[in-house]
Image (cartoon, rainbow, N blue to C red):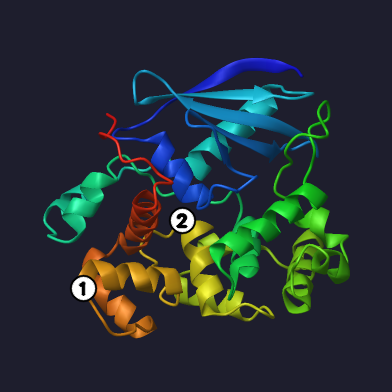
């Protein structure tokens, strides 16, 4: 397998690679976004239709990241793609100092933010990937949803040219547009979910749907565009706004797991609904969605999946 000189990225501190990767991974069995206690790994599709392996390590200086590339045909174009991918996946180019100031004044949020100091809000590489993730996890546990996504990537993702048995990239619209719903059903997707994924993939690949252009719309218009798609409801649309478009003020208000985390944080015994969630998170605007990631990480830390350590940098 060919390698090239790593891409060095300077990050505005504080930054913790481990916490940020876990916010992206969500579960230990995620085979697309991988973590081995020191290195984040992912297969990324290149502009030439191929794929390359990307690895990210945090140096002895917490603000220094080294992005390694491996695979056939790794060149300067791949280096540019890798730099952009790392910035997007790991939220490297964000200045969150205002969030830190806000959290320090909040008696509930302050201790949580302190425990997770160095976390950055991750984003999926594309709005399409965020949408497929949302569809897979609709009305299922996150554990089951990630199993479905792993199978989808293993079947339809791009392999490394010189190591086809290795992990694969997340499949893009072109890879999924040629699938039939019954093929996805064999991976565990319901017929409705399989049909929606294939339909969206074909629309994007055919040029009749541009999910990346949602970035140019306000929240209301983007939500309307998404929920106009068959099989896409409010939860999935808000999930895409946060995890696909990076809108850190959006807190998915129908997220059952988030409901449970908010109830514990606020000491609430009664059930929550979307409106009540938005009332609770309103004081955290414009970083309510970033708090969503903090709650996720705190839940993972409470089960021992994420290790609580002294903040880096």
Mark 2 element type: loop
Q: Quadrant of residue 285?
A: bottom left
On the image, numbered disc 2 is attached to which residue?
A: 246
Name which of mark 1 and mark 2 comes first in the sequence.
2
Residue 83 in picture, x, y percent from top left = 55, 32
Position of the C terminus by quadrant: top left
On the image, numbered disc 1 is attached to which residue?
A: 267
**Alpha-carbon neighbours of circle 2 within 10 Å: few (<14), some, or many (≥20)?**
many
Q: Nearer the viewer, residue 182 or 231?
A: 182
The residue at the far top in this view is 5
Q: Can residue 222 be seen at all in this image of the molecule?
A: no
Point out which mark residue 280 bears.
none
**Which residue sits at x=21%, y=46%?**
114
Q: Are marks 1 and 2 in contact (CB under 8 Å)?
A: no
Q: Is 237 rendered above or below residue 19?
A: below
Residue 220 in picture, x, y percent from top left = 46, 77
Mark 1 element type: loop
**Relative to 301, 84 lies left or right:** right
**Alpha-carbon neighbours of circle 1 within 10 Å: few (<14), some, or many (≥20)?**
few
Q: CA distance from mark 1 to mark 2?
A: 29 Å
Q: Nearer the viewer, residue 293 or 185?
A: 185
Count of numbered labels shown in the rendering? 2
Q: Nearer the viewer, residue 94 or 274?
A: 274
Residue 97 in picture, x, y percent from top left = 24, 44
**Which residue sits at x=53%, y=60%?**
215
């Amino acid at each position: 397998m060919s390698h090239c000189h790593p891409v060095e990225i300077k990050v505005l501190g504080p930054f913790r690679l481990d916490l940020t990767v876990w916010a992206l991974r969500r579960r230990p069995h995620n085979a697309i976004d991988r973590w081995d206690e020191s290195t984040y790994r992912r297969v990324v599709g290149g502009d030439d239709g191929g794929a390359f392996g990307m690895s990210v390590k945090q140096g002895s200086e917490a603000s220094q990241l080294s992005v390694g590339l491996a695979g056939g045909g790794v060149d300067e174009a791949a280096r540019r793609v890798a730099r952009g991918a790392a910035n997007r996946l790991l939220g490297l180019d964000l200045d969150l100092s205002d969030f830190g100031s806000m959290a320090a004044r909040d008696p509930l949020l302050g201790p949580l933010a302190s425990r997770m100091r160095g976390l950055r809000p991750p984003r999926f590489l594309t709005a399409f990937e965020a949408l497929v993730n949302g569809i897979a996890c609709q009305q299922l546990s996150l554990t089951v949803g990630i199993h479905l996504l792993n199978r989808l990537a293993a079947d339809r993702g791009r392999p490394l040219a010189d190591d086809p048995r290795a992990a694969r990239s997340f499949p893009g619209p072109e890879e999924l547009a040629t699938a039939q719903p019954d093929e996805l059903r064999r991976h565990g997707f319901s017929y409705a979910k399989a049909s929606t994924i294939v339909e969206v993939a074909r629309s994007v690949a055919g040029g009749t749907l541009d999910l990346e252009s949602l970035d140019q719309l306000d929240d209301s218009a983007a939500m309307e565009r998404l929920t106009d798609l068959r099989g896409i409801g409010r939860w999935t649309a808000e999930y895409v706004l946060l995890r696909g478009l990076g809108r850190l003020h959006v807190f998915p208000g129908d997220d059952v797991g988030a409901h449970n985390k908010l109830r514990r944080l606020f000491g609430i015994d009664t059930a929550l609904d979307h409106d009540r969630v938005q009332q609770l998170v309103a004081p955290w605007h414009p970083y309510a969605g970033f708090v969503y990631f903090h709650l996720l990480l705190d839940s993972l830390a409470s089960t021992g999946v994420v290790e609580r350590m002294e903040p880096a940098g």
